[in-house]
Amino acid sequence: MSEFDPPPDSPHQPDENPAATPASPPGEPLFAAPPPEPQRDYPEDLRTPWGWGQLTLFVVVAFVCLFLVTTTMSLILIFGYHMSIAQVRTYATTSARFNSIGMAIAYVLLIGYLYLTVHSRKNPAFWRTIGWRHLSFSRIPRAALYPLLAVCGMALAVLVQLGALAFPTKHNLPMEALFHSRTGILWLMGVGILLAPAVEETIFRGYLYPVLARAFGIEWGVVVTGTLFGMMHAHQLWGGWGQIALLIFVGIVLTYVRARTGSVLASWLIHLGYNTFLFAGFFISTGGLRHLPPVN
């Protein structure tokens, strides 16, 4: 029975003797308030101090953050580099450096917001609370487990590439406009490998998934979280519906791994291996970025 559950077969009554309430076990984070969802026997990795209200506020903050970052960078181009509004719009859709810097700034701001709202004196274990827990399997040493998960991510990338062959080739995807500058691609690779997997896993599998799993059940929580993850990238692949469907599949796989292991660390390792394999494949196929695709 969860620490949040009332006694079975009896209405929940306030404890008339607070002094008799047992203290929290040593080392466990002390939450300010229980989750607002219906109380059940949730696994430990789903017991988070935030619910729908905090999640809705985070979505609003994320949109405001992205708007402010994009607007600020655009104003810098207009007043600092004397670009016209039309030039800024073109640059924003074709410059990998512009997109990478904006993405990195937004990621840092969002993680900072989560830290400020989750971390407190009563709840100091921010990373553990948001899902980053050590992995432990009796049959696999940790030194071998972590690289194995990264290799699984690479295998997932191969599977997705093979799956893409079943869909008609879609040219002129919005994301293709970012792969025509060697310097810009290096920026994309840096953000896509070093920053994006950690931040996206923290947000989707760490912050979003527990709320959805408590509300809809673990199975539907996995599906909905994975679908939202894929749809977040839809603007980069708009028109390539097969590619978007494959990204939703990747999101569901990552969330399933998070649910099975109870740790964001596992899904991050697979996500890291997935992104690294894709960028490495592009790097090799273009001769070390010397033979980039032509600009259409």
Image (cartoon, helix red, strand yellow):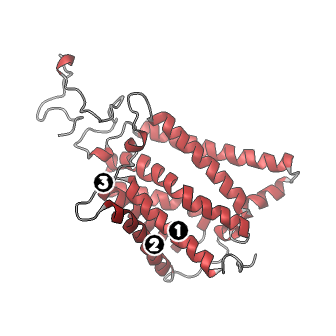
Residue 133 picture location, percent across and down: 35, 49
- C-beta proximity under 8 Å, tags 3 and 1: no
Whether residue 237 sits left or right of residue 39 in the image: it is right
Label 3 Cα neighbours within 10 Å, binned few <14 / some 14-19 / many ≥20? many
Q: Residue at x 68, y 46 (%)?
A: 69
Disc 2 or 3, which lies upstream in sequence?
2
- Residue 1, by quadrant, is top left
Residue 59 picture location, percent across and down: 52, 44
Q: Amino acid at mark 1?
A: Thr
Marks 2/1: CA distance? 8 Å
Residue 14 picture location, percent across and down: 21, 21
Whether residue 180 sits left or right of residue 201 in the image: it is right
- C-beta proximity under 8 Å, tags 2 and 3: no
Label 2 Cα neighbours within 10 Å, binned few <14 / some 14-19 / many ≥20? many
Disc 2 or 1, which lies upstream in sequence?
2
Residue 218, label in figure = 3
Residue 85 picture location, percent across and down: 83, 53
- Residue 52, by quadrant, is top left
Quadrant in which the C terminus is drawn: bottom right
Q: Disc 3 on helix, strand or loop?
A: helix
Q: Disc 2 on helix, strand or loop?
A: helix
Residue 154, label in figure = 2
Residue 276, label in figure = 1
Q: Disc 1 on helix, strand or loop?
A: helix
Q: Amino acid at mark 3?
A: Ile
**How many numbered tags mark residues here?**
3
- Residue 252, by quadrant, is bottom left
Position of residue 54 relative to residue 218, above or below, is above
Marks 3/1: CA distance? 29 Å
Q: Residue at x 67, y 61 (%)?
A: 187
- Residue 251 is at least partly visible in this image: no
